[in-house]
């Protein structure tokens, strides 16, 4: 929301008063004087007028989790443990999952209460690739590479997937980079060749890589530098 609209929604200020507050440099957002009425403020912003706090700002939370097999990417599930069950109760509040993983898929998962930030990380329009290590039942042919680059037609969604980057690492292992997150997308891509995916591990999402010191089921807060990369 724009700063002038935030202030104007308060019953104590009319439009003229809001303009005067900004011109007179009486408004601070996150400790800085702000005079631009179009300045964006969010639920995380600390907003003051003349040292009076109008909004304390909710603390933003950004977590990296090494998802193990055997838990679902959901906030609650009646049958299976969820990734949130791996966190202590005080950390779970208001968190959502940025980029889900299948039940048996392992690797990097991001949980946050910042919806705008998570959309930048996961939306295909931002073109931030997600990289996976893939193991298959049968050998992966060199001819797969061009097909992944061309895209696959998914009849159910009536769409062709965006170009993907496939790098062969061994007879039955590859690294795959995709910018989408369609339903069972990786398995369906390899299914085009009747080649079953038997292991799938997400290494990175955009500029954020899974911390190699995190064992499956462990988590840590993202650093300020990691958050700023998105």
Image: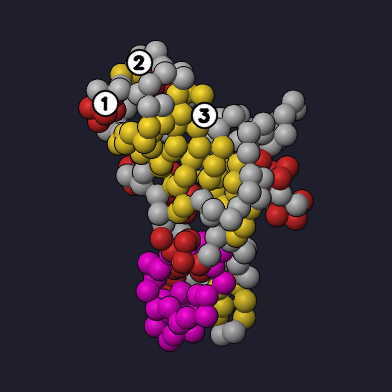
Q: Where residue 199 is drawn, which disc sits there?
A: 3
* Sequence-wise first label, 3 or 2: 2
On the picture, is 69 further left or further right than 32? right
Q: Which residues are magenta?
A: 17-46
Q: CA distance from mark 3 to mark 2?
A: 16 Å
Where, by quadrant of the figure, is residue 175 drawn? top left
Pick the quarter of the image with the C terminus: bottom left
Residue 105: percent from the left, percent from the top?
55, 33
- What residue is pinned by disc 1? 142
How packed is label 3: few (under 14 Cα within 10 Å), some, or many (20 or more)? some
Front: mark 2 or 1: 1
On the picture, is 58 further left or further right than 169? right
- Secondary structure found at label 3: strand
- What residue is pinned by disc 2? 193
Residue 145 vs 116, above or below: the answer is above
Where, by quadrant of the figure, is residue 78 drawn? top right
Residue 23: percent from the left, percent from the top?
39, 83
Determine if the magenta segment contains residue 5. Answer: no
* Sequence-wise first label, 2 or 1: 1
Residue at 51%, 61% in the rendered image: 42
Q: CA distance from mark 3 to mark 1?
A: 19 Å
């Amino acid at each position: 929301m724009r700063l002038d609209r935030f202030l104007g929604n308060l019953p104590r200020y009319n439009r003229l008063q809001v303009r005067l507050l900004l011109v007179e440099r009486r408004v601070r957002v996150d400790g800085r004087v702000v005079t631009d009425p179009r300045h964006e403020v969010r639920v995380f912003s600390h907003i003051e007028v003349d040292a009076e706090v109008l909004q304390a700002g909710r603390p933003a939370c950004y977590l990296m989790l090494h998802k193990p097999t055997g838990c679902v990417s959901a906030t609650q599930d009646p049958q299976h443990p969820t990734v949130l069950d791996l966190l202590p109760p005080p950390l779970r509040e208001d968190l959502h999952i940025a980029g889900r993983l299948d039940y048996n898929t392992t690797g990097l998962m991001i949980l946050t209460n910042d919806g705008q930030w998570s959309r930048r990380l996961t939306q295909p329009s931002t073109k931030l690739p997600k990289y996976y290590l893939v193991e298959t039942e049968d050998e992966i042919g060199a001819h797969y590479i061009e097909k992944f680059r061309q895209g696959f037609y998914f009849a159910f969604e009536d769409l062709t997937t965006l170009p993907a980057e496939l790098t062969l690492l061994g007879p039955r292992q590859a690294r795959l980079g995709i910018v989408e997150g369609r339903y069972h997308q990786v398995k369906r891509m390899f299914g085009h060749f009747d080649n079953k995916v038997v292991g799938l591990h997400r290494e990175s999402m955009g500029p954020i890589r899974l911390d190699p010191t995190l064992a499956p089921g462990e988590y840590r807060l993202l650093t300020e530098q990691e958050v700023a990369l998105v």
